[in-house]
Amino acid sequence: MLFLAILTIKSTNIAIGQSIEKIAHIEDPVLQLEAVLQFPVNFGKDTVALKNTLAPVLTLADRKHNNILKWGYYMRMADGYSIAFDRTNPVSDQYYRLAEQLLQKHPNIELEMIGNTRQGYYNYVYRKVKEAFPFFLRANDLKSKIDIKKIPLVVKHYQFIANFYSYIGDHSIAVDYLQEALPFSKAASRERVDLINAIAVYLSNDSLNHQAVTYFNRAMSEAKLAKDSVWIGIISGNLADQAWKAGDRQKAIALVQKNIDLSMRFDERKDAMRANLNLANWYIVLQEWKLAKQHVLSGISLMEEKPYFLKYKMEASKLLSDIARGLNQKEEELKQLHVYLILKDSLEKRINDKEIQRFLWQRETERYNRAIQSAEEKRLHTKRIYQFIGLCLILVFAIVLLLINRSKAKIKIRNTLLEKDRLKLGYERQLLDQELLILKDSLGEFTDTIKQNDTTIQQLRQEIVKVSAQNPAYMAQVSDSLNAMLQTHIMTDERWLKFKHVFDKVHPGYLAQMKQNYSKITDNDLRILALQKLDLNNSSMSELLCVSTEAIKKAKQRLKKKMELRD
């Protein structure tokens, strides 16, 4: 019940509507969550009232799409059901799971730490200590990763952790948590007094008495500033222990009596009980038997029939046995000793359970650390694999890039060569075009010359006819000129080859195609076809080929028949 009472402090006197309205207008997310975590949830077993009370918180969270508020709602619902059941229960466990699942979707390392802390303390308070181990281990592991300024109710949550670590005997860690929480406590407040006093107690448990006294004195100063008489009494009792250890018995007794007076005045029965037993023990050392017995009986009168008081009942029986021995009351001594042994047997089982829990905690801690180490090794292994894969991908990318660049270079070289070949072909084509033009001109001149010579030959022949009877000498001269011209005009085989070479370039493939299409065509036929292509008449052809015009006509007729009889 301590866990839940701490959570609901300062909120039970706030009207529900006003609380929701205030929460809605709080801008700081940490303060807003703190307001939710202090929302009233103690309705006894009335879970309907619990749901109705917290429903506006869920509505606000959904309306604002605020996952932090929804997480706080789950926490408070878990608290409320633990109050209703007064034990761990499936409904509270379900709300803790919902909170965890919410953080898996929307990570928040500070809330993850506090969620583990609260669920661990929930198990611890209801004495499911073993079940609390994993949650506190995880919370402690996250401590180095969080920003403490983002932790809601940091003092309360760190107190939960410190209480647990103190229970399992690890007081140094408990002190560390409380010292970190101390700056977040309000000056001259009961909260700060509680923190400082707890630090002193944990230091004392580790036999660090000098440091413990420093913190006890500091706690006393804070309690006086806060004018908190209850805490002044409690701290007086703690300082009394330190004074007794230091040998200042008179001061120790005075302080513990002050503790008893203040505790009784403000109805702090448990503290008054412990102080009475403590003072009785000191009076036994001083052999003040009557005073010792008086305080033992005062302590017993403050005890209740609850498991918590079993330890103190055993202590009281042992003190009464020692007092009876001091007063030489043998029968009473044996009686109290018998009660003491019975209570001791009963308590030892609980103590053994606690020792077992401490052993289990150590084992669980070792297993958790091994799991963390294994997870870290696995993470590093996975990281190395990803690094190797990344390196391979970079290498492959580099190779591909190199191949692409190489391919581009080859393409560039090939394009350069193609461009070079294109330019070369263009140049050669230009030369061929120029050559073809020259050949065309040459062939044209040849044709014109043939025609002109043919005209001249005809004129000379007519001239011979005219002067043959009148002037024999001139006729001989004209005949010589005609023969000379005919000699240059006639197409001999040698001239035909030269002519054909030029003709084939001007009219490429013409004669070859004719020869292919008409296999019966002879070389003489090819000459006729070439001269026809040049548009020479029969007369010009006859002069060139040194045959009669009739022969040319017949040759053309034969050629025509050959072409008509195509294969």
Image: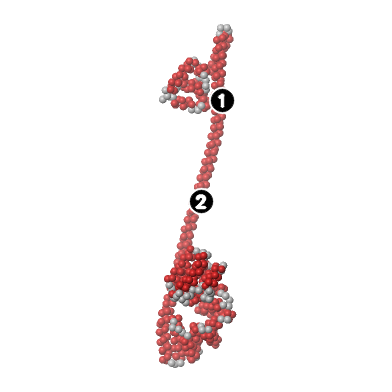
Q: In front: 194, or 166?
A: 194
> Which amino acid does the dot numbered 2 rest on?
Ala
When asked about the image quadrant of residue 336, the answer is bottom left
Say which residue appears at 43% left-offset and 75% top-offset: 85
Q: Position of residue 437 (x, y in %)?
A: 56, 28
Depth check, front residue: 475 or 258: 258
Residue 394 in the image, given as x and y percentages of width and height: 50, 53
Q: Residue at x 41, y 86 (%)?
A: 339
Q: Residue at x 51, y 49 (%)?
A: 401
Tell me whether circle 2 and circle 1 mark residues in contact (CB < 8 Å): no
Q: Residue at x 53, y 80 (%)?
A: 209
Q: Is residue 480 visible?
A: no
Within 10 angstroms of label 2, few (less than 14), some, or many (20 or more) residues?
few
Tag 1 or tag 2, which sits nearer the N-term? 2
Q: Residue furthest bottom?
A: 328
Q: Which residue is mark 2?
A: 398
Q: Nearer the viewer, mark 2 or mark 1?
A: 1
Q: Secondary structure at mark 2?
A: helix
- Which quarter of the figure is the C terminus placed in? top left
Residue 50's spot in the image, x, y percent? 47, 72
| Label 1: which secondary element | helix
Task: Give me the C-alpha separation between circle 2 and circle 1.
Answer: 62 Å
What numbered label is drawn on residue 441? 1
Amino acid carrying label 1: it is Asp
Residue 9 placement (x, y as % from top left): 52, 76
Asked where in the image residue 321 lies, by quadrant, the reply is: bottom left
Q: Is residue 317 above or below residue 141?
A: below
Q: Is residue 88 above or below residue 475?
A: below
Count of numbered labels shown in the rendering = 2
Q: Is residue 556 above or below residue 49?
A: above
